[in-house]
Image: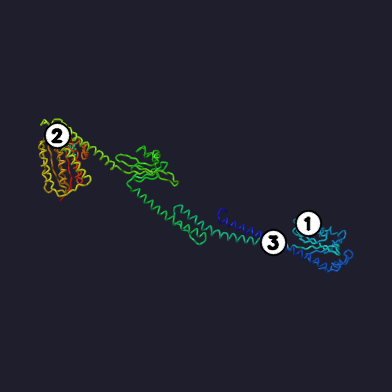
Amino acid sequence: MFKSIKWKFILIYFLLVFLSMSIVGIYIVHQLEDIQLEMSRKNMEKRIQSIIYSSEVLKTKEWSENVDEIQENFRSIQISYNENLYVILNDEQKTIIAGSVEDIIGQSAFNTTSINNYIFIKSLTGTAQYTVPPNQYEEIEGDTETPIFYHMSYPVKMDGNIKGYIYITNNIEYIYDTVNKSMEIMTQATIIALTITIFLGLILSSSITGPIKELTFKAKQMSQGDFDQKVNVKSNDEIGQLGSMFNFLIDELKNSISSLQQEKSKMETTFKYMADGVLTVDINGNIIHANPVAKNILLLSETEEKYDDVVKNIKGDMVLSNLKDKSYHGTEILEKGRETYNVDYAPFMNNQNEIGGVIIVFKDITEQYKIDKLQREFVANVSHELKTPITTIKSYAETLLDGALEEKQIAEDFLNVINSESDRMSRLVSDLLRLSRMDYEQTKWKKEKINVGEMLGQVAKKLHIQAKNKNIKMHLGNIQDDIFVLFDRDGFEQILLNIAGNAVKYTPEKGNVWIDAFRDNNKINISIKDDGIGIPKEDQLRVFERFYRVDKARSRELGGTGLGLSIAKQIAEAHNSKLTVNSEAKKGTEIIITIPEHS
Ligand code: ADP
């Protein structure tokens, strides 16, 4: 209970008021008692002096010789109810010669209990003595009824000699009654003051602890995530200022939190929709955050997984200890299935400015990697393709220079070889140029409406001699003359010549080539079919790759460059068209060109 400020307040106030009231009370009562006693003493002294001065015999005559007169005189003195008076002779016995109590007259002052021996003996020296009861001589323990008396022994002198003593006792109970009454009043006042103190203390402390309690309550609500808190500011004092500051801080906090949340949500959206995979791992290898792309790459389940468990099966040297060896900084290439990723990782700091973990970014570079690979292969292929005719030409030219030129027949044969190899080189170079132009989209397609039947007729005508040389029958279908396509004329012819040329090339003597075209759902299918050597299943998809040939030697022998079909495919794709292969080894091949119809 006394842990609360409220009760501490009240306790302190209580003690403060209690102590001050007690000190003031005790002081006042004591002072009162002292003043009263002093007044009583003075009154007694005056009373004795007035008795002496009003009596001739006491004042001027020798007491021992005038005892009777003194006694006579004494009877005329008015004795008040609360006092006792005695006249004591200064003889050997100190005899009481007159007094308000008749019984003790004639007795020695030393032998009566009415006289306080202590002060009486002290007064024998000649100075008046008095005592303030209760004291050790007068107080009778436990006897509260015993009246309390003030004693005074007053020596009366004449010519320097003590004639006798006037002894007076005064009942001063009324002083103690007054003192006790005052004490009672002070106690009551203290109790009233303490009650008021507790009451006021409660009001005062509540006015301080109330707002503090409210602040504490609101702060607790805030700690539970409820920031819609405001305290009521009722005053402009320190407590009021604390409340205003609290409200200000809440507003600031709310603003900061909302901008933080905005930032967080921006970051989350960025992470969620970014094309790269982002993974955050703490220093102990726990995955803190993974965006959908990273989850997909690493096949992360929703359950908490350790980074090392996930990564060790994909790329062992990317486990956390290895990244640590490189100070959590570096780049790796990660190949997973058909995908290739560039993995960058870098450390992040915690609030103590120590490494708190590592952020790993997976960038899908599959396409770029493939292109790089294709480029390398392409350069190797081109070099290889060029090297063969150049070697042939060089060796034949050298042989000619070495003397073969003399023999006409041999020289002619050699020059024919050189010529045909040069043709092949020139075909290769022009094919490469065409491809390169298409790659860099420098080819300007002049799309025009072309009659498919007419174009197929021309192509058949161009291949006629080639076919005739091999005794191949060309079958041109009965094509409707209202079939049109929107195509670049040269490009269209190139596709058809490449495909139909292949049909003638890869069909043995006395074979057949069929060329036909027909409508199919707003599309035109041009079919070029042969009963030649066919293309094995496993090669069918790859024949459209650059330099891919099923049988390299045969293709070369037949003057092929390995680029015909890839050029045809690229031109077709530039005109929203596609090529399909249907073939069976040793039975024949059909290549279908599907083009949108142009009405
Ligand atoms: P090439 O200049 O070698 O003919 P292409 O790109 O035109 O190059 O053809 C690629 C490969 O596809 C050829 O080398 C050949 O092996 C195969 N091919 C193409 N057309 C046919 C066909 N009609 N019959 C059999 N094989 C073919």
Tag 3 near tag 1, CB within 8 Å: no
Q: Secondary structure at mark 3?
A: helix
SS assignment at label 2: helix
Question: Taking the image as drawn, is residue 401 in sight?
Answer: yes
* Side of 262 relative to 206 (left or right): left
Q: Residues within 10 Å of mark 2 (few under 14, many from 20)?
A: some
Circle 3 or circle 2, nearest the eye: 2
Q: Which numbered tag is attached to residue 80?
A: none
Write down the residue under mark 2: 417
- Answer with left or right where residue 599 lies relative to residue 290: left
First in sequence, mark 2 or 1: give its number: 1
Q: CA distance from mark 3 to mark 1?
A: 24 Å
Front label number (2 vs 1):
2
Other residues around mark 1 within 10 Å, as few (<14) / some (14–19) / many (≥20):
few
Name the kind of residue labelled 3 in the image: Val
Q: Position of residue 145 (x, y in %)?
A: 75, 59
- Graded by Cα atoms within 10 Å as few (under 14), some (14 to 19) or many (20 or more), the crowding at tag 3 reads some
Q: Label 3: which residue?
A: 29
Question: Taking 260 as reference, is 396 above or below it?
Answer: above
Q: Residue at x 55, y 55 (%)?
A: 5
For badge 2, the amino acid type reads Val
- SS at mark 1? loop
Residue projecting furthest to the right = 65
Q: What kind of residue is marked 1? A: Tyr
In the image, residue 386 sits, relative to residue 41, either above or below, namely: above
> Looking at the picture, how far across and down is residue 185, in whole percent?
67, 62
Q: CA distance from mark 3 to mark 2?
A: 147 Å
Q: Quadrant holding ligand 1?
A: top left
Residue labelled with disc 1: 137
Q: Position of residue 581 (x, y in %)?
A: 19, 40
